[in-house]
Amino acid sequence: MKHSEKSIDKTISIVKDVLSAGFDIRVAAEVALIDPCDEYSIANCLEEYGEYNDDGNLAKLIVNIYYLNIKDNLIIPDGAKWKIDDGNGIWDEDWRLDKNDIIDNIDWDEIRSYKTVWINLTGNLPAVSFFGDVDHFEFSEKITIHPNVPPCRDDFEHDWQSPYEVVGGIEENPGVKGNGGGVIMKRVCKNCGKYKITNTWDYDPEDGIQGLTSIHYEDADDTSLEWIDDEVQ
Ligand SMILES: [Zn+2]
């Protein structure tokens, strides 16, 4: 059910809640008709019935009915606006769903690349305090999308190893080299010869944030395939 499609049962139960909290039918009807996706509708109702609102009771009631997550004493309404930015621009400036709906609805395989990418979700969330003050605050979340793991050989699973003769580096710690505040690790699969490169100090080109972990895979090459042959013999 969309947030805007309130069922009649829901409306009746809101009316009952408001009546049982001691407010009259006019207030109950008004509260029941609030569009839960529209923070201004909620704010207007709070303002209009301010006379009932001296002790915050009506505000609390409205908040309880229409607003979901409590954060720092502010309540974020269900259906707040989110923006999503994949570095090539904002997709939808008015996506009124909750964050998990957005994450669940995205076709990640369309975005997924040969190497880890990051998607930045930003929200301009209307929020209301328990006393009916409406405010906005910015919220952002970085979503990490790792590449799909390429298949191993036949029915094998990858067995990532770091033989010095294949992955190089220093003998004490093969395949590892320092990178900023982290390392780049190169591993090779003992079964198929593909490489897995993990960078623990990568950065998101969109916002320049560093220290992110990225992964990419590389095809087997002569060096890795020869190593596999040698190991088998
Ligand atoms: Zn493999």
Image (cartoon, rainbow, N blue to C red):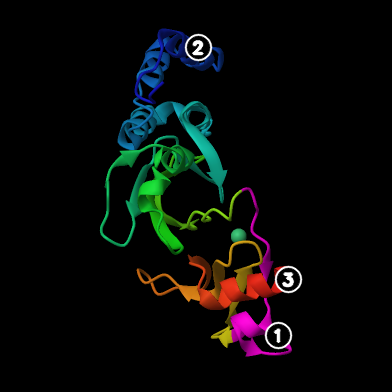
Q: What kind of element bears circle 1?
A: strand
* Mark 1 neighbour density, 10 Å: few (under 14) some (14–19) many (20 or more): few
Q: Tag 2: residue type?
A: Ser
Question: Residue 93: horizontal and vertical position, in percent?
Answer: 27, 47
Q: Is residue 77 above or below residue 125?
A: above
Residue matched to label 1: 173
Q: Of the residues under marks 2 and 3, which one precedes in the sequence?
A: 2
- Image quarter for residue 227? bottom right
Q: What kind of element bears circle 2?
A: helix
Residue matched to label 3: 233
Question: Residue 77: horizontal and vertical position, in percent?
Answer: 44, 37
Q: Could you tell me which residue is drawn at 67 percent across and 84 percent down?
A: 164
Residue 56 is covered by the magenta coloring? no
Residue matched to label 2: 13
Q: Tag 1: residue type?
A: Asn
- Which numbered disc, 2 or 3, marks the residue closer to the eye? 3
**Could you give the CA–CA distance between mark 2 and mark 1, rounded to whole angstroms?**
65 Å
> Residue at the front extreme?
233
Q: What label sits on residue 29 in the rendered view?
A: none
The region drawn magenta spans 155-177
Q: Of the residues under marks 2 and 1, which one precedes in the sequence?
A: 2
